[in-house]
Image (tube, grey):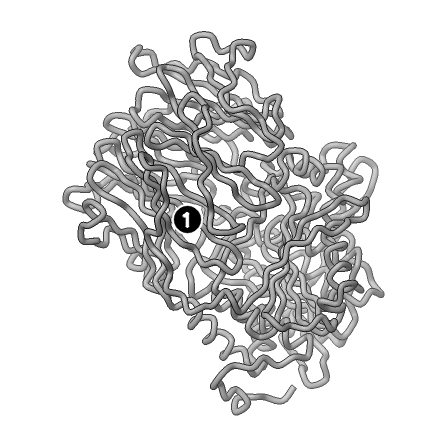
């Protein structure tokens, strides 16, 4: 690899595609070394952690020049983006929810950057636009992140996010006039808005230093009460714990606003669970009292209140979770009453509406939904159209029916209405997407990982696709944080499948597919199991001739970006292309930025002597080796990502570009005005088109677009 440098600048944005050589910005190194329990670890690109320094900004600009210069010369890039727009151009709706006389739902006409919040009076009323986030900003990058109605429906909290940031600014809207009041609440994060009487509870952090929003630790999470019509400076501090600055504190209220709950978690100390406190406003005493006094490894979440007792879902004594009734006047665990016992399948979700409990179980990564009465008695299973994923069922106690959405990989999201009295479902709204699921095949296989564990995996492809080892295959994984990778429909994915591509979703350990045991098998000291599962998935696809190493691409975001970065260090020979997105790439310093300390419960911490060797052994940035032929790699991140800060990807890209001397490109694509995910639809489609183009080009394949004469635009490589 040839590198060019100037005397003044530390970069040179020259890229020579014809010779398949790449000249990346010359990234200077600093002499920074940290002692981790006796091990000296160099960190030469630590200066890139200063996200807003002019030096870092220049580096990002020059990297983007190289990356977009490369992408712009792929002849079918524009056609792929056009096709993705065509596939997405159909009306999309969310399930409606009722508040008093109105039903609220989101609608996107097709290619709107943000979905529009609508409401209508009764199911037969005329819909009206309530909030159009596309008008929040000129570029459509400010989104509606929170919408919370007061009990009487008179007011609503409208929370806005700018550029994909996790920070929120809350406003109050008068639902009669549809005008904003003067109320403005800043620096809200990890928070909803829970109404009680003439105001609402919210959580925030102290205002960070200007320009340091990405590099500053978020500490001292405070709960406030805001009274409608007053300035934020008059908000009442309800709860804080400055002695434990890395705790989350959030408050919720029951539907009748009688009970207020305080949830406390302490993941920065490695604890997976939460404490649970409450007060009863009827008593006039707003002092929180304990239901669960201490934070431990167990989770407790209030579902509803029945006759003064709380229905709580917990994994305390039930790794697949159960529902218990807790008397707040006698909250000791010995007095809990089991309402819904643990089953072999994990409870994925539970909600209440119409004086019923709707319980969703996960069986081999697909949903099963059951209706119980409020005492836990099983009444009915709601039959779903096929194997897939269901969501919804929330509502008010006096609802006569609820709505739910069902989807699968080749089943576009369809909204159903469930009539509680007759226990019957009917289609409420079916999408108008131009897509025939009969043209595609979905297989679910169970393949063996390195230690013999059977891991589920979905494989989707066009009918008639031969198993000849030559199919471009995109393997996606996550594997962490007790999050299940459920089968769901994506119109952009159809663009990949119709080009003869195979899409694969691996359900790795670390997720919640099989409850807490599956999660625990892929976290902390057992994190290597996740990487082994992903590698085994690639080996299975090659062994069964779905694809070969010359046609296998891998993709993952956030914790999944960590996954991709790690496995190409461990098995670079197995993959042709790698797409690590917004990844956690520095496992020794992730807890130093924004809410990164929150992940200590999942990963451990380099500050702990017992954790350091494990983290150091797989940290993507620290295990890049010279003399290895890495896959073609497109790293993606965004300048407003204040969850997994872009410094992770910056340092990782600089290290990989420094050490890898082979023929494959190593590019970093830095989106602007976006966060941990694309801040609008346009940016999302542009990113996906670039990813698909990058993969096909590096597999030396040419997509065929019907009616597209992209050969006229073809450039020399």
Q: Quadrant of residue 259?
A: top left
Residue at 73% x, 62% y is 541
In this picture, residue 455 sits left or right of residue 117:
right
Task: Give the image location of residue 423, x and y in percent.
Answer: 36, 37
Q: Secondary structure at mark 1?
A: strand
Question: Of all residues shown, which one is farthest toward the top?
Answer: 330
Residue 65 picture quarter = bottom right
Q: Can you give x and y, in whole percent of width and height, for residue 398 in the image?
A: 27, 30
Q: Is residue 165 visible?
A: yes
- Please identify the quarter of the rendering in which residue 657 is found: bottom right
Q: Is residue 674 left or right of residue 179?
A: right
Residue 452's place in the image compared with 58, above or below, is above
Nearer the observer, 388 or 713: 388
- Horizontal and vertical percent for residue 543? 79, 63
Quadrant (top left, top right, bottom left, bottom right) of the C terminus: bottom right
Specify few, some or many for label 1: CA neighbours under 10 Å numbering under 14, 14-19, or 20 or more.
Answer: many
Q: From this view, report whether residue 350 is shown above or below residue 15.
A: above
Can residue 649 be seen at all in this image of the molecule? no
Which residue is at a point 44% across and 44% down the rendered structure image? 391
Is 500 or 62 nearer to us in this picture?
500
What residue lies at 55% left-to-right and 63% top-to-bottom? 670
- In this rendering, the answer to whether 551 lies above or below 429 is below
Quick one: 314 or 253, which is closer to the camera? 314
Image height of 22 relative to 445, above or below: below
Residue in front for this viewpoint, 557 or 595: 557
- Label 1 sits on residue: 405
Residue 195 image position (x, y, % from top left): 30, 30
Total count of labels: 1
- Looking at the rendering, in which quadrant would you find the N terminus? bottom right
Judged from this view, the residue extending furthest toward the bottom is 712
């Amino acid at each position: 690899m040839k590198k060019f440098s100037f005397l003044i600048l530390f970069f040179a944005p020259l890229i020579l595609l014809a010779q398949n050589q790449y000249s990346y910005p010359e990234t200077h190194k600093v002499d920074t070394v940290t002692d981790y329990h006796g091990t000296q670890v160099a960190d030469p690109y630590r200066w890139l952690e200063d996200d807003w320094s002019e030096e870092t900004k220049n580096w990002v600009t020059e990297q983007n020049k190289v990356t977009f210069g490369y992408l712009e010369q792929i002849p079918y890039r524009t056609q792929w983006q056009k096709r993705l727009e065509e596939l997405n151009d159909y009306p999309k709706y969310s399930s409606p929810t009722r508040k008093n006389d109105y039903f609220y739902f989101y609608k996107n006409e097709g290619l709107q950057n943000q979905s529009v919040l609508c409401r209508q009076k009764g199911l037969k009323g005329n819909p009206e636009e309530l909030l159009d986030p596309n008008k929040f900003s000129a570029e459509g990058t400010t989104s509606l992140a929170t919408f919370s109605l007061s009990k009487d429906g008179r007011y609503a909290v409208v929370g806005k996010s700018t550029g994909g940031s996790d920070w929120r600014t809350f406003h109050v809207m008068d639902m009669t006039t549809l005008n904003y009041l003067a109320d403005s609440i800043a620096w809200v994060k990890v928070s909803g808005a829970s109404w009680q009487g003439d105001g609402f509870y919210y959580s925030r952090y102290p205002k960070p230093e200007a320009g340091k929003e990405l590099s500053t630790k978020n500490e001292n999470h405070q709960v406030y009460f805001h009274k409608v019509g007053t300035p934020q400076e008059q908000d009442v501090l309800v709860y804080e714990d400055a002695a434990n600055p890395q705790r989350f504190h959030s408050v919720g209220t029951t539907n009748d606003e009688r009970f207020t709950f305080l949830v406390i978690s302490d993941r920065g100390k490695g604890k997976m669970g939460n404490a649970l406190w409450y007060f009863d406003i009827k008593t006039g005493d707003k002092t929180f009292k304990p239901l669960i006094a201490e934070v431990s490894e167990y989770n407790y979440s209030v579902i509803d209140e029945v006759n003064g007792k709380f229905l709580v879902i917990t994994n305390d004594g039930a790794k697949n979770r159960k529902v218990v009734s807790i008397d707040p006047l006698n909250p000791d665990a010995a007095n809990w009453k089991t309402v819904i016992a643990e089953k072999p399948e994990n409870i994925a979700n539970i909600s209440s509406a119409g004086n019923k409990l709707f319980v969703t179980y996960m069986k081999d990564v697909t949903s099963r939904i059951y209706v119980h009465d409020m005492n836990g008695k099983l009444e009915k299973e709601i039959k779903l159209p096929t194997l897939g994923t269901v969501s919804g069922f929330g509502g008010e106690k006096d609802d006569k029916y609820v709505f739910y959405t069902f989807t699968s990989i080749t089943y576009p999201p369809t909204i159903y209405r469930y009539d509680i009295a007759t226990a019957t479902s009917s289609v409420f709204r079916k999408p108008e997407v131009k897509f025939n699921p009969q043209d595609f095949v979905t297989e679910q296989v169970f393949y063996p990982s390195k230690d013999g564990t059977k891991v589920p995996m979905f494989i989707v492809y066009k009918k008639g696709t031969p198993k000849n080892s030559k199919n471009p295959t995109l393997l996606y994984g996550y594997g962490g944080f007790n999050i299940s990778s459920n089968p769901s429909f994506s119109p952009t994915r159809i663009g990949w499948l119709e080009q003869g591509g195979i899409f694969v979703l691996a359900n790795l350990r670390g997720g919640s597919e099989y409850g807490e045991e599956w999660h625990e098998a892929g976290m902390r000291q057992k994190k290597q199991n996740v990487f082994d599962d992903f590698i085994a998935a690639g080996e299975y696809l090659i062994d069964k001739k779905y694809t070969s190493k010359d046609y296998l691409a891998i993709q993952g975001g956030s914790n999944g970006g960590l996954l991709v970065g790690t496995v190409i260090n461990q098995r670079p020979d197995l993959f042709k292309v790698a797409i690590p997105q917004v990844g956690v790439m520095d496992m020794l310093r992730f807890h130093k930025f924004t809410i990164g300390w929150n992940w200590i419960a999942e990963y451990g911490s380099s500050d702990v002597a017992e954790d350091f060797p494990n983290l150091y052994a797989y940290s993507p940035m620290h295990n890049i080796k010279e003399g290895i032929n890495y896959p073609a790699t497109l790293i993606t991140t965004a300048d407003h990502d204040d969850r997994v800060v872009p410094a992770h990807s910056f340092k990782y890209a600089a290290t990989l570009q420094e050490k890898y001397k082979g023929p494959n490109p190593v590019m970093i694509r830095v989106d602007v005005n976006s966060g941990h995910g694309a801040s609008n639809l346009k940016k999302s489609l542009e990113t996906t088109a670039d990813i698909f183009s990058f993969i096909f080009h590096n597999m030396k394949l040419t997509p065929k677009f019907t009616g597209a004469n992209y050969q006229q635009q073809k450039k020399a490589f």
